[in-house]
Structure formats: structure tokens, C-alpha cells
Image (cartoon, rainbow, N blue to C red):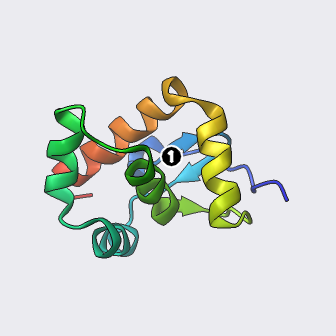
Amino acid sequence: AKPVSTLPNPARGEAEIAGICLRPSFAALVAAEEELGPLFALVDRAAEGQLRLAEMVALFWHCHTGCQLTRDAFAERVAGAGLASATPALRVLLGQILKGG
């Protein structure tokens, strides 16, 4: 199944990866933190170049909107898009975490 393609709204801190809109809502960030641990530690790991692909995909997964893929298919789609494609979306989400969403 293809994800529902929606355009991200930069005014809401949204980003896009592989045609999937990512919205860092409070609920999404809380869910990501439950899985990944403190988000500020995640930001620190990213700044140090220590963020793992699985962590990035998990953050994206919790922030996705309108995606009908399973988590595994979602992860494959993100990985297939490549790190160059994922970096801008990651930068937006990490910025929103630091700003307070």
C-alpha cells in the first residue's frame, strides 16, 4: 500500500520523507520518547553523529501522518529514500524538539 501523500506545513514544523508527512505533535514526541528515551539525549546523539538509523526511523514513525504502511514497510521506504533524503526531515524534527514543538 502506498502512503497518503500530503504536503508538509512548515508553519507547523512538519517535514516530509519519501512522500510521507511528518508532524512532531506533542503526542507523537511523547510516544517517541517512550520508545527512544529522553529526546534531548536523542538530539545530542544526532549532533555527535551517533544517531542510529533505527532511532531516526522510530522518530519518523511516531511523527508520520496519513501513512497506511506497516512499520517494517515504512522503515524500508525511509531507508530506500536514503540518508541524503532523510537528513532535512530529521533536521526539522530535531529543531522542533529543541524549540518545544
x 24%, y 31%: residue: 49
Instruction: Look at mark 1 in the image and give the residue it sits on.
Output: 9
User: Would you identify the image quadrant in which residue 11 lies?
Assistant: top left
Q: Quadrant of the C terminus?
A: bottom left
Q: Between residue 80 and residue 39, name the one nearer to us.
A: 80
Q: Position of residue 35 (x, y in %)?
A: 34, 72
Q: Would residue 65 appear left or right of 13 to someone viewing this image?
A: right
Examine the rendering and report whether any part of residue 16 can be seen. yes
x 44%, y 52%: residue: 54
Q: Position of residue 86 (x, y in %)?
A: 49, 34
Which residue is farthest right? 1
x 60%, y 52%: residue: 75
Q: Between residue 99 and residue 9, name the one nearer to us.
A: 99
Q: Between residue 15 and residue 18, name the one nearer to us.
A: 18
Element under disc 1: loop
Dot 1 surroundings within 10 Å: few (below 14), some, or many (20 or more)? Answer: few
Examine the rendering and report whether any part of residue 99 can be seen. no
Q: Would residue 71 appear left or right of 45 to someone viewing this image?
A: right
Q: Position of residue 13 (x, y in %)?
A: 38, 48
50, above or below 54, in the image: above
Label total for image: 1
Q: Quadrant of the N terminus?
A: bottom right
- The amino acid marked with disc number 1 is Asn
88, above or below 17, in the image: above
Q: Position of residue 4 (x, y in %)?
A: 75, 56
Which residue is farthest top? 84
Q: Would residue 7 appear left or right of 51 to someone viewing this image?
A: right
